[in-house]
Image: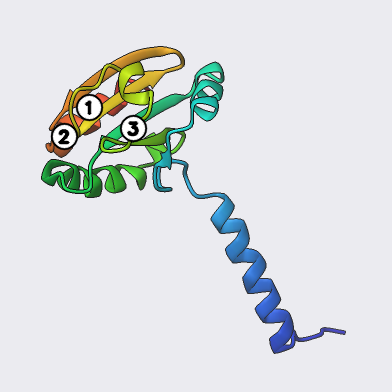
Amino acid sequence: MTRSLTPYHLIIQTLFALLAAAFMLPALAAPAQPFDEAAFRKAQQEGRTILVEVHADWCSACTRQKPILESLGKDKAFEKVVRFSVDFDKPGNALKQFRVASQATLLVFKGDREIARSTFDTNPDSIRAMLAKGI
């Protein structure tokens, strides 16, 4: 005997499928999380590839970098990259810690080693190549 699903069951089944898909999204596809020292150290200890994005809301280069980083987030090669965002205009130790003097700076780490750094780079190919160094 076969039983057809009721609309209620179809809705529940669809919701579970959507939830499962949401948990499978790549890490880079998610927006960069605000920089947190403990989370950064944890990612370093796990040997993860880390992208630190130093930005300012008023920065035109930062605005041009954003869609490039979002596009890379859809690339399977970068799905395990952990992203952190540092607001250039907010006081904190991150700018000193990373020795960053200007906004639109991107830093790539592999574990506890800084692998690459760029400032004001808005070229998709060079940003991709820089991030690939950490993979």
SS of the residue at dot 1?
A: helix
SS of the residue at dot 3?
A: loop
Residue 104 pos. (x, y %)? 19, 34
Q: Return the residue at label 1.
A: 129
Q: Is residue 114 left or right of residue 124?
A: right
Residue 125 tag number: 2
Marks 1/3: CA–CA distance: 30 Å
Instruction: Single out the mark in the foreground, 1 or 3.
Output: 3
Residue 74 pos. (x, y %)? 35, 48
Q: Return the residue at label 3.
A: 91
In the displayed structure, would residue 3 be above or below residue 62?
below
Foreground of the two, 90 or 58: 90
Query: Residue at point 36% right, 17% down?
Result: 97
The quarter of the image holding the C terminus is: top left
Asked where in the image residue 123 lies, by quadrant, the reply is top left
Colour scheme of the picture: rainbow
Residue type (three-letter) at the residue carrying disc 1: Ala
State the residue lying farthest toward the top: 113
Instruction: Single out the mark in the foreground, 3 or 2.
Output: 3
Residue type (three-letter) at the residue carrying disc 3: Pro
* Residue density around tag 2, few if under 14, some if 14–19, many if 20 or more, within 10 Å: few
Contact, mark 1 vs mark 3 (Cβ under 8 Å): no
